[in-house]
Structure formats: structure tokens, C-alpha cells
Amino acid sequence: MSMTATRVQHESAEPIELAEPEHALWRDSIRRRCGLDFSEGRRRFLSQRLRERMSLLGIESYGEYYRFVEHDFEGGREWQRLIELLLINETSFFRHPPSYEVLATYALPELMRERPGQQPGEDFIRMWSAGCSTGQEAYSMAMIFPRAAGAGQSWQTRIVGTDISERALAKARRGHYRKHELRGLPERFAGRHLAPAEGEPGVYKITDDVRAHVRFARFNLAGADDFYMPEQDVIFCQNVMIYFSLDSRREIFARLCRQLRRGGYLFLAPGESVGLQHPGATPVRVHDTMIHRRAE
């Protein structure tokens, strides 16, 4: 690039970081649409992601891009592309091991003990991985379930994983992972529930015996999406709340508690439940892990 072209680019380019009031405009719009929090501490990250999309579209200013996503015919599709960039799909198998230990040795056995004599076809436990990202959490729940159900028992599980990211969900549904994406997966599960993906060197797929119990769907935890889901026995929503504003966290927590079946259990990540309360859910400490149980 010539020196002249470089000088013209710098003279006409939008400031690299969002300034007020445009930051407030974008922050409030994103919060309204999906609950994600892009306050001052995340302004630079937001600016970088906006500029990525602006560059691809040939849009020069934050204001012009805002008008495009808010009012243009293609704005809805562009919003989803932007949201995909703003999401941080950081996850792993058995990310917080103590939670899965409590699930297998306390929550699931308690649920099964309290519901004896189920009719044929009704002896299943419903579990929800809320904010499932690329699927590792939901598959972890499916892998550990047989430990609680025990040999010779008729209990089964039905697991749904939801996320706002279509890109993450596509990967979750496929169930194919590279070696670095398998971190956290104990060897005993890897040997039993993984197989080499045909024609994909270095890639492993989740076996059908696990996949059969898991399905995935798009759902915005902080929105008012029209998505029917029956009451759940167990809900995992870990390392998700940190990306939302306090008001959104309170709304999401209340929604999750309402979605629990009576006697069901909610698992958040350590520290995520601070300041969150719901009249129908009681905190329960099992060993060093805090979970919430919906009242009978």
C-alpha cells in the first residue's frame, strides 16, 4: 500500500474503539436482544468484533452499521452473524468435575429414589444443558448417567442442549472433536464413548450409544423465544451467567428454577449464584459444591 493510500485510510477511518454515545447504543441493543453484557470492561472486544463485520460489508462507521442491522431487510441475518462473533464458545468435557461427581452420586440417585414404581416408558430422567456451546457438557451428562442408574436398572435419560449460536449447535449435533477439544474427558469414558471419525485424521466422534440420548436446539436464555420444553429433573448452566448483565442473570436464574420439576436440581458454576435467589429454589451444599433444589 502506498504512503498516500495509508494516509487517506487513517484520515477517513472510524476511531478504532467505540466512543460514547455509540457504545451505549450498541450495548443496550445487544442486551435487549440477547442479554449479553458489553459494558465498559468489554468495550474494546465489542469494537473489534463490530469492525470485523463492518470491514466485510464495506461499512465505514459504527452508526451506519447500527442502522443496517436495525432497519435493513437483511438486518436479522446480520444480527445472527454478529452474535456468532460476540459469543465465546469456551467449553470442555467435565469442565467442573465436582459437579459431575455430585450429579452421579447425589442428585440422580436422590431423584431415582424419590420416584420409585415408575410406569413402563416413564422411567427416565430429563436433563438440560443450558448454554451448551459445542456440546461437550451435554455429552458429559449422558456419559456419566449410567453410573447413577446402575446395572440392570430401567432408568434412562433424555438430554437437551440449547444455545443461541447456530454454529456451535451444528458442531454439537455432529459430535466430532479434535484431540484438543477432548480435554477433561477421563480415559475411561474416552475408551468407551469415542471412535475415530472416518476420513478425518485426528478427529474423534461421539458413539451412537451416547448420541441417542442427546438432542440440540437453538434457544436464547435471555430472550422470549417460543420454545416448548417440559419440566426438567436436572439443569446444568455452567460458565454462562458471567456473560450477562445482573438483571439478565436474575431473569435467567428465575427461568431455570421455574423449568425444574419439583425436587429437581440446578447446577451453576462456582460463584455464579452469588446474589441470585428464587423463592422456589433452595441452595444445597453437597461436599464443596453448591447446587439448587426446587421445593417439592
Image: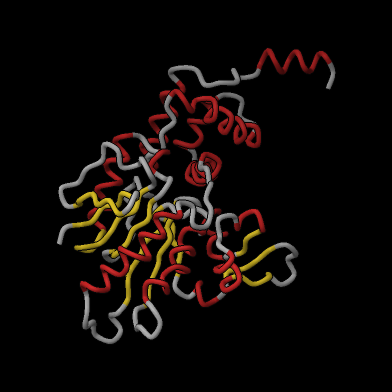
The correct choice, above or below, for 89 with respect to 17 in the image is: below
Q: Residue furthest right?
A: 2
- Quadrant assignment for the N terminus: top right
Q: Nearer the viewer, residue 18 or 42?
A: 42
- How many numbered marks are there? 0
Q: Residue at x 60, y 30 (%)?
A: 51
76 displayed left or right of 174 = left
Q: Is residue 106 above or below residue 64?
A: below
Q: Which residue is located at x 28 percent, y 58 percent?
A: 265
The colour style of the image is secondary structure
Q: Taking 64 as reference, is 111 left or right?
A: left
Q: Position of residue 209 (x, y in %)?
A: 51, 77
**Quadrant in the picture for residue 214:** bottom left
In the image shown, does 25 or 42 lie closer to the viewer? 42
* Quadrant of residue 239 within the rendered picture: top left
Q: Which quarter of the rendering shows the C terminus?
A: bottom left
Residue 215: x and y, percent?
45, 67
Percent position (x, y) of residue 89?
A: 53, 47
Q: Is residue 7 left or right of residue 30?
A: right
Q: Is residue 278 above or below residue 32?
A: below
Q: Residue at x 42, y 74 (%)?
A: 146
Q: Position of residue 244 (x, y in %)?
A: 38, 38
Q: Residue at x 27, y 51 (%)?
A: 285
Looking at this view, is 144 or 197 the one in front?
144
